[in-house]
Amino acid sequence: MVTFEILLIEPDRVLAASYVEALQAAGSQVNAASTAQAAIMVADAIPPDLVVLELQLVEHSGIEFLYEFRSYPDWQGVPVLIHTQVPPAEFNDSGQLLREELGVCEYLYKPRTSLSRLVASVREQLPVGTPAGAEAAA
């Protein structure tokens, strides 16, 4: 069975624990971080196949994280799923920026997204083929 590495960036520890449990139950490895800086360090240590990102982070915003994350060549093609408290209407004018420049594949608004929908979205966005860390292990 192929296992994918998911980088979860969620500042709320209770929500993060719920998401980690649900995503692991669905068969993924999940590495959680609560800040943008910690997320970069985790991604450097364990290359992610997918990032699940809350935009509202302490110190650096999720958008700032995305700009830094995309500045590394190895991470330019990693899909990013935003799962946030920020209403999508706040990005009406920036939707193209999120999709094209920052590689956001889906935007989920937490108040309207069930845990099962989050897991289904993650499954839909996982790349087909070899997980990111597999070639390093071979």
Image (cartoon, rainbow, N blue to C red):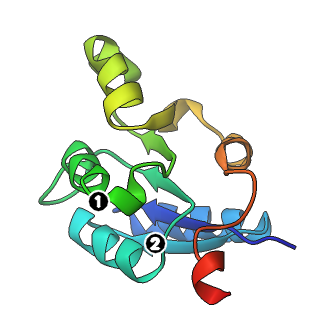
Count of residue discs: 2
Give coordinates of residue 115: x percent, y percent: 67, 48
Identify the residue at horizontal 71%, vertical 71% (top origin): 24
Between marks 1 and 2 in the image, the one whose residue lies nearer the viewer: 1
Q: Which residue is mark 2?
A: 32
The residue that label 1 is drawn on is 72
Please tell me which of labels 1 and 2 falls first in the chain.
Answer: 2
Residue 4 seen anywhere in this rendered image of the structure: yes
Q: Which residue occupies the foreground of this view, 129 or 46?
A: 129
Residue in view at x 71 percent, y 65 percent: 130
Q: Which mark is residue 87?
A: none
Query: Does 134 sit left or right of 89 as displayed?
Result: right
Q: Is residue 10 visible in this depiction of the protein?
A: no
The N terminus: image quadrant: bottom right
Q: Secondary structure at mark 2?
A: strand
As drawn, is 71 to the left or to the right of 125?
A: left
* Marks 1,2: beta carbons within 8 A: no
- Residue pictured at 36% horizontal, 77% vertical: 44
Q: Nearer the viewer, residue 30 or 131?
A: 131
Q: Position of residue 11 (x, y in %)?
A: 34, 62
Distance between mark 1 and mark 2 Cα atoms: 20 Å
Kind of residue sitting beneath label 1: Tyr
